[in-house]
Image (cartoon, grey):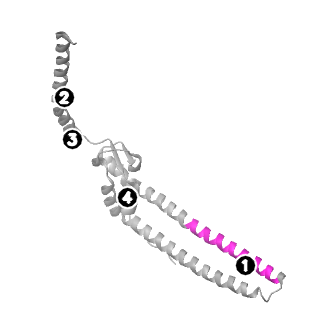
Amino acid sequence: MIGLAGKLKWFGATLTLGLLLAGQPLAVCAQEAVTAQAKPEILVVDRERLFTNSAFGRASIAREEEAARALEAENSRIQAGLVAEEQELTVLRKTLSAEDFATRADAFDQKVERIRAEQDAKARDLTKARDENGKAFLVAVAPVLEGILNRSGAVVLLDKGLIILAVSSIDVTDEAIAEVDKVLAAPSPPAP
């Protein structure tokens, strides 16, 4: 059983906690007002959205998709030719000697392996070009991002993908896209 002193102590602690909590909204409001007026020291930018939503990025993506479609069409034509050649070889098998058939089958297999290696290399080249294009974009937009950083008074600009939680007011991606579109022309397609 709690004595009178214990009850008074508990009441005093509860009253103190209540008073502290009652004053909390004022402290939070005051802190939010200071935060709203203070310039953020950290800014974030969504690098993926910066690239895909800028005119430069959209043109680059369109060019990459066009090249991928062209490679896919080329692969389909090659595959159709190889299927026809394989069917012809199958028909010839009945009329050729075992040695002649083996020679032609080996040549066909080598041709298929060579073509596969060539087409794989073309696909890797597309991926490499996409990566290089992304890196070149980041180099080209660095001065724009630096300008935004300097104007804001912030000390660091982070990729939004590295952030777990942040207030939306420090995200400067839309501002960066607008400035990049003003400064950086969309890349022209390569000459045929």
Q: Which residues are magenta?
A: 100-125
Q: What residue did someone put label 2 on?
A: 21
- Horizontal and vertical percent for residue 78? 61, 80
Q: Earlier in the sequence, mark 1 or mark 3?
A: 3
The residues bearing labels 2 and 3 have C-alpha atoms spaced at a distance of 25 Å
Q: Give x and y (percent) for residue 159.
A: 40, 49
Element under label 4?
A: helix
Q: Nearer the viewer, mark 4 or mark 2?
A: 2
Query: Hey, which residue is sitting farthest bottom in the picture?
Result: 95
Q: Residues within 10 Å of mark 4 (few under 14, many from 20)?
A: many
Q: Which three-letter amino acid code belongs to the residue tagged 1?
A: Phe
Select label 2 or label 3 by which is in front.
2
Q: Which residue is drawn at the image coordinates 72% and 78% (left, top)?
A: 108
Residue on which the image places disc 4 = 50
Res. 97 in view: yes
Mark 1 vs mark 4: in front: 1
Image coordinates for residue 158, horizontal then vertical, percent: 39, 47
| Amino acid at dot 3 | Gln
In three-dimensional space, the C-alpha distance between marks 1 and 2, rounded to whole angstroms, equals: 82 Å
Disc 3: which residue: 37
Residue that label 1 marks: 108
Q: CA distance from mark 1 to mark 4?
A: 48 Å
Give the distance between the C-alpha atoms of the residues marked 4 and 3, in whole angstroms. Answer: 27 Å
| 124 inside magenta stretch | yes
* Residue 97 appears left or right of 38: right
In the image, taking residue 183 as reference, residue 5 lies left or right, namely: left
**Inter-mark Cα distance, 1 to 3:** 73 Å
Single out the residue that lies furthest toward the front. Answer: 1
Quadrant of the snapshot with the N terminus: top left
Q: Nearer the viewer, residue 67 or 115?
A: 115
Q: Residue at x 20, y 17 (%)?
A: 10
